[in-house]
Amino acid sequence: MLSGQIVSKVSFLVTMLFLARYLDDKSFGLLSFAVAVGMVYMFISEMGVSITVNRLISLTNDGSSRALPSVASGLRILLSTTGLLLLAFLNWIFSRSLWELAVLIPVALSYSLDGFSEIPFAVFRASGRAGRESLARSLGGLFSIAAVILIIKADLGLLAAAAVFPLRSAVTMMVAAFLHLDTGFGLFPSFDRAAMLSLFRDSLPVGVMGLSLAAFQRVDNLLVRGVLGIEAVGAWNECVRIIDTMVLLITPTLLPGALFPGLCRALEQGGEAAKQKMRDTGSFILAIGTAVTAFLLASGSGLLALLWGAGYERGLASDAVNRAYEITCAGIVPVFWMNFLVAALIAQRRSSTATRAAAASLVVLLALLFLFLNPMGLPGAAAAMLAASLVFAVLLTIGIGRNTASGLVGSLLPALPGACLAILAAVAMGRLGVPWLVKGLISGAVSAISWLAIDGRKVLGRL
């Protein structure tokens, strides 16, 4: 499963890298904005359905959940259609631009198709067939790279580039549906009103939580566009796209994903098993976050220039973009921690706790964006996001509950020595003039190896 997520997310990143070099600043900014808005639409059309299906199948062994994917497919059709109409209406009200709508709708449609793929993926994860998800994601990701290369060679423009996104998602969905045929679970849409209403009620708390999280993670794009312009959205997304790709290796790859069924079962049992699972999962997630942060920070602007091209600043001052990138990288660990605790709350069926934390953090984020954006520019957006993420992480840690969280903060400790050693290594290599890529790789490796030596091998053995 992890390999499929890596291929899929890296393919998405590569697609954006190619388009960043091909499109002008305004067009790339508009496409980046569409991708950000599409993420919010995905949660509107999802409303927690696939996560609920995953949880119910993981906890049910008597075959009573066989019809759930069919009911979920029918519900997703209604939610996706309603969400797409709402998105088109709001875009027309606020922008009055058919051109912008022509870019936004295909990107949003791709997220809708991704949501349909999540239904068979939920079955694969819960029934121990994660390799099938890996294959479907990989084929879709590789298709998108090939399609973008053809579009750039033929110089077909922005609209053709936007069309790549739903085509990629359609390939993934069709492969997933085919691989789902022999699982014994239904998939063909069922519009049984009573079953759909029951699933919607079960999913709604998770859906509201997901929508709150999406708003928290994407509202910055609206304000960056309003204050700094559409070109700045492109530069901002160049900073956060790398981070988002790393976060997507955790969510949904591990949580909810490969580690989620086991987490659900452990928390359902409670007791020492639940505490141990929380400690081990937390330690693993933090180790990944620390190693990724060490690599990205040590690599610095050299990585931005390599990935996005020499004009990655998109007309903004290079210092501003570089500072924004560095501050954003510093937020990886709290964001990883947030995703871990949100998954634990979902497994406990306490998504309302995460919703309240997300709402409070969203208020903090909006206030800080209004305060920071005008005087600080793009680094202000990064600082606001970092501060709000820390608030969110603290609120979730408090809200997870004393019994479940027993010893949880202790899972922070094994990653700290690696972080300190990585900082020392990066500073030393910087003074020696070591190339940025070597410096980044060594810093990340130092962090990871330190965790493995202290606690990692035991944790991985238990997970």
Image: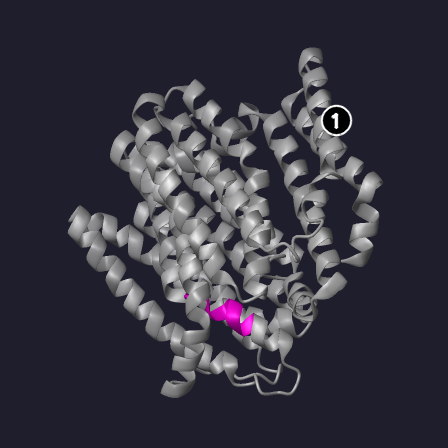
- In magenta stretch: residue 86: no
Tag 1 residue:
421
Give the colour scheme shown.
one colour
Magenta-highlighted stretch: main secondary structure?
helix
| x, y percent for residue 447 | 73, 34
Foreground pick, 305 / 402: 402
Numbered label tally: 1
Corner quadrant of residue 219: top left
| x, y percent for residue 187 | 50, 81
Q: Residue at x 60, y 66 (%)?
A: 133
| x, y percent for residue 200 | 41, 75
Q: Which range of residues does the magenta coloring cover?
A: 47-54
Corner quadrant of residue 356: bottom left
Q: Which quarter of the rendering shows the C terminus?
A: bottom right
Q: Is residue 400 left or right of residue 105?
A: right
Element on which disc 1 rests: helix
